[in-house]
Image (tube, coloured by chain):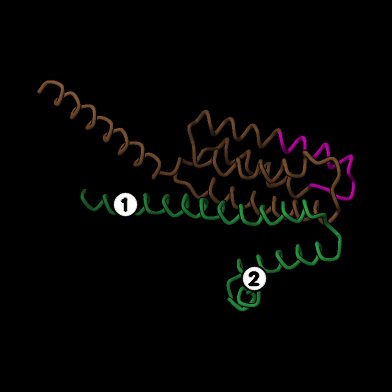
Chain colours: A green, B brown
Amino acid sequence: MLEDLHNSNKPWAVERAQLLESYVNAFQTGQISREEYAELLTDLSRFDGLEEDVNDIVLKSKLISALELAAKLLG
Amino acid sequence: MKKLLTLITVAFLLSGCAVVASVQSFFPSKWDPNEASAVTDIRQQARQLDCSDPVKLKQQLSSLQARVQWLELYSDSRKNEDMTKITKVFDITLKGLSDRKEYSKFFCDSKVKIMIKESDAIATAAQGRNK
């Protein structure tokens, strides 16, 4: 599954895969505790939600600008 | 009949309020210079976090926490719900490190990385809004 992310040609997906791999590796080699591992996974998942919200804000702002420009045609 | 009319009026008003609320939640908040400044501070402070010096890190996290709280309160008072929501996400990530008494170096480095990414994303939202 991580392989798919690496081969996706999507920078964000490749980056997520790299982070996830580093977490798994750190947990398996005892660099982080079970609790820390769980928290990092939660952070990564929460970050996806944050990015969605950010994209929404930016896209909606652009839509409003486009609507305002379009409305100017009405004179 | 009078009761029925009252009920219909109340239902209409309630649905009207719901429509207004949903329209309001669709529109992103406007660009705000104070939010833009606070987000830039947060980005900068996140980049300066130094996991190799726990004493210094504690002070840095405390300073960052104060700036994040300022932004949260400011956005909340401006009723910029979208900004409040995404700032709260950063706050949760930050507290996951600042509230810990002990942590590994890898954990600290990883939290800093994700905080930098989150602060960059919040800045994209804050600066991508219309004036």
Disc 2 and disc 1: Cα gap in Å? Answer: 35 Å
Q: Looking at the magenta stretch, what is its main secondary structure? A: helix
Q: Which residue is mark 1?
A: A67
Q: Quadrant of residue A28?
A: bottom right
The type of residue carrying mark 1 is Leu
Q: Which mark is residue A14?
A: 2
The quadrant of the picture occupied by the N terminus of chain A is: bottom right
Q: Chain of mark 2?
A: A
Q: Quadrant of residue B40?
A: top right
Residue B20, placed above or below residue B43: above
Residue A1, placed above or below residue B41: below
Image location of residue B46, percent across then percent down = 73, 47
Q: Secondary structure at mark 2?
A: helix
- Disc with the residue nearer the chain's start (2 vs 1): 2
Q: Nearer the viewer, residue B85 or B60?
A: B85
Q: Bounds of the magenta span?
A: B49-65
Image position of B130 (left or right of B126): left
Asked if the magenta segment contains residue B62, the reply would be: yes
Image location of residue B69, percent across then percent down = 65, 33
Toward the top, the furthest residue is B2
